[in-house]
Amino acid sequence: NDDDDDDNEELIPAYVEARRLFNFHEVLPDSEVELKWTECQPGPLKTFLVDEMGFNPDRVQASIEKLQKAFKGSAKPQSRMDSFFKVKANPEADAKRAAKRKAEKEAAKGKGKKGKKGSAFHKKK
């Protein structure tokens, strides 16, 4: 019977096992996890990635430098959201505003002229 169980385990396709691991992975409770962003430790990181895992030393060094640069860049306070967006000039809206102002000026000039002619202080010749 033990041989039959071994045969059944071998018949499970690899993708099914991968799906099971993906969907039913181990999860730690929030109370046990404390994340803190600190500067990377290049020595132990390089030892782990290059010596133990077989990564390319040049690529690891380049990535460590990028990581250190990112940490230094994030040491300053976080930027506000509006600092990412700049107000662009809208030529069409500017043209409409200018035309509206011009029309209002013309209307004001026209009213002003009429008011002066019909004024009681206007001398007749």
Image (tube, rainbow, N blue to C red):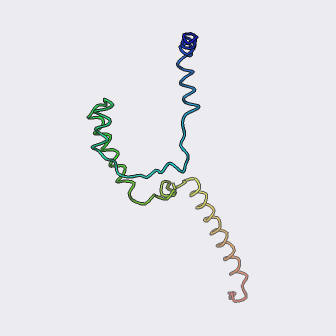
Asked whether 48 or 56 is in front, the reply is: 48
Q: How many marks on residues?
A: 0
Asked whether 30 or 119 is in front, the reply is: 30
Residue at 67%, 77% in the rendered image: 112
Where, by quadrant of the figure, is residue 51 drawn?
top left
- 6 above or below 63? above
In the displayed image of the protein, which residue is found farthest to the front?
1
Where, by quadrant of the figure, is residue 75 drawn?
bottom left
Where, by quadrant of the figure, is residue 24 drawn?
top right
Q: Position of residue 99 (x, y in %)?
A: 61, 60
Asked whether 18 or 31 is in front, the reply is: 31
Q: Position of residue 50 (x, y in %)?
A: 29, 33
Position of residue 90 in the picture relative to residue 111 (left or right) = left
Q: Position of residue 65 (x, y in %)?
A: 30, 44
- 23 above or below 89? above
Asked whether 115 or 24 is in front, the reply is: 24
Q: Quadrant of the N terminus?
A: top right
- 101 above or below 81? below
Position of residue 31 in the picture relative to residue 79 (left or right) = right
Q: Quadrant of the C terminus?
A: bottom right
Q: Position of residue 66 (x, y in %)?
A: 33, 44
